[in-house]
Image: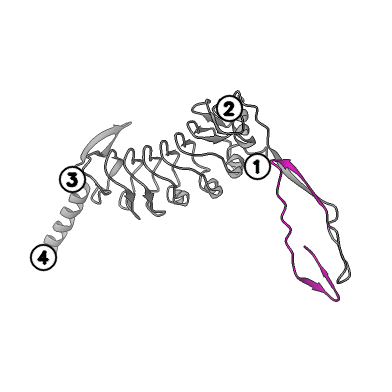
Amino acid sequence: MYLLVLVHILQSTLLAVQSCPALCACTYGYSGIAEIRLVQCSDPGISAVPINVPADTVKLRLEKTLISRVPRAAFYNLSELRFLWLTYNSITSIHPSSFVNLKALRELRLDGNLLTSFPWEGLRDMPRLQTLGLHNNHLSSLPAHAALFLPNITYLDLSSNRLTILPAELLDLWFPLPGQQERPEQRRVLGLHDNPWLCDCQISMVMSLSTSLASPVVLMDQLLVCRRSLGQSGLPMTQAELSRCMRPSVQPAATKVISPLGSNVILRCDATGYPTPTLTWIKTAAYTGNTRSGL
């Protein structure tokens, strides 16, 4: 009896490894001297991520299907997966935990979908990811916190989206000041073309720094075009007159002011930078004896 149970378990395990999802093709290829499992699903009749992909799959391609969403833990059993292509489907949403357990993944491509946002925090589940393709989607903005999850990405394609500005946090990641980088400097390839860029000083910084020989960034296409810029719409950035950014600097007239309760106090603070920085005064309610201090 024990032997029969053991045989059944072994057969179930082999079936899970060797079976191929319906409407998909499972083959073997070679990477160096090793044989690897390749699975391709490109039938227009597929409307959901297959759940029975062989566990030893190294490269999975789900392309030109009717898949519209990627659910939570969609690839949890594919711990050996290194290449995941979800290109030219109809994907509109990705769960933040869709990529749980993909610790070996090196390449994720989501080109040609309908994404208006991307779960950047999900990159934590793919610590070895180096290539991220988001070409030809509907992304209209990049959140500042995306920079927290992109340090390991050396190839990032954001071309053919609806992006207008780049957050300063990404510029700090891509172009760190001397002494700021925590790891050896690595070159990054960025795809930023075919977006309706607001031609401001930040995108100007990307253009000017990426053209230097020692730049840590290489643009796939240098031809970025101004789409939202007063008097310069439609001009290539190389021909537009763009201002350079200046980091903000704040200089208060006094660092500490103590005054009797009820008296008037005039506070001054000078700020320089480009674009012109915005100052916000915060009032506190700190009492000391008969006086009140602080803004």
Say which amino acid is labelled 1: Gln
Decide: is 57 above or below 233: below
**In the figure, 237 relative to 61: above or below?**
above
Residue 46 — which label?
Answer: none
Image coordinates of residue 185 in percent, x first then y, are 58, 36
- Mark 3 highlights which residue? 22
Viewer-nearest of discs 4 and 1? 1
Where's residue 294, x and y in %?
A: 79, 64
Indicate the amino acid at tag 3: Ala
Determine the secondary structure under disc 2: loop
As helix, strand or loop, the secondary structure at mark 1 comes to loop
Q: CA distance from mark 2 to mark 3?
A: 49 Å
**Disc 2 marks which residue?**
237
**Where, quadrant-wise, is the N terminus in this rendering?**
bottom left
113 with respect to 284 (left or right): left
Q: Which residues, given as a range, are shown in magenta?
A: 267-295
Label 2, residues with CA under 10 Å away: few <14, some 14-19, many ≥20: many
